[in-house]
Structure formats: structure tokens, C-alpha cells
Image (spheres, rainbow, N blue to C red):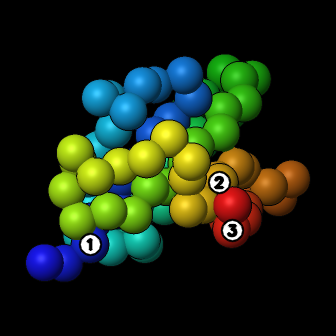
Amino acid sequence: MQDLFFVRIGPDTLDDVRAFQSKSGAVAYFRRVAEELARYGQQIDGTVHIAPRLSDIVEYPDYVLSLGPRGGVKIERA
């Protein structure tokens, strides 16, 4: 079974995550949301959880995402 990349943004619960087939798809989704909020002066962080299915997600993330000072997405291994 192939692993999926689940994105959790801000205060979302694990039940509110979105699944993607690739890490790059997950990061691109986070970028769109974070850039939209940045236009209004808001900052948000996100996490990526790697698991084969939603029921296998654990609270501790695999990656932490944030917008960098120049607008790129910072991806930090958790």
C-alpha cells in the first residue's frame, strides 16, 4: 500500500486533514493557503503526516511547514 501525505493546517484537527499522493502536492496546497492568508497579514503553519491511510495518522508530524521570509515554503523534518 502506498503512503499518502496528509496536510494539517493551523488549528485543524487530524480529522480535518487533506490527503495527497505526493509530498510536493501537499506542500503546494499549503503554499496556496498560506500565501492567501499572508495577503491579509496572517501567518499560519502546517504539518505533513505520512501514512498509508487516514486511520494510521499519529499526532506527531513528519514535516513542519511555514512560509519563509522571502515567500518560499520552509520544510523542516520533525
Q: Residue furthest right?
A: 69
Q: Regarding mark 2 in the picture, which secondary structure is present there?
A: strand
Spot occupied by residue 75 in the image (x, y as percentages of width and height):
67, 65
Report the residue at 69% width, 61% height from top. Answer: 78
Q: Regarding mark 1 in the picture, which secondary structure is present there?
A: loop
Find disc 3 in the rendering and name its residue: 77
Find disc 1 in the rendering and name its residue: 3
* Mark 2 residue type: Val
Label number found at residue 64? 2
Report the residue at 38% width, 33% height from top. Answer: 14
| Separation of residues labelled 3 and 1 (CA atoms) | 17 Å
| Separation of residues labelled 1 and 2 (CA atoms) | 18 Å
Sequence-wise, the earlier of marks 1 and 2 is 1
* Mark 3 residue type: Arg
**Observer-nearest residue: 60 or 6?**
60
Q: Could you tell me if residue 18 is visible in this image?
A: yes
| Separation of residues labelled 3 and 2 (CA atoms) | 6 Å
Sequence-wise, the earlier of marks 3 and 1 is 1
Where 24 sits versus 29, above or below?
below
Asked whether the residues under the numbered discs 3 and 1 touch, taking CB atoms below 8 Å apart as contact, a structural biologist would say no
**Observer-nearest residue: 4 or 36?**
4
Dot 2 crowding, Cα within 10 Å, few <14, some 14–19, many 20+: some
Where 42 sits versus 3, above or below?
above
**Quarter where residue 8 is shown:** top left
Q: Nearer the observer, disc 1 or disc 2? A: 1
Horizontal relation, residue 21 to residue 47: left or right: left
Dot 3 crowding, Cα within 10 Å, few <14, some 14–19, many 20+: few
Spot occupied by residue 40 in the image (x, y as percentages of width and height):
67, 21
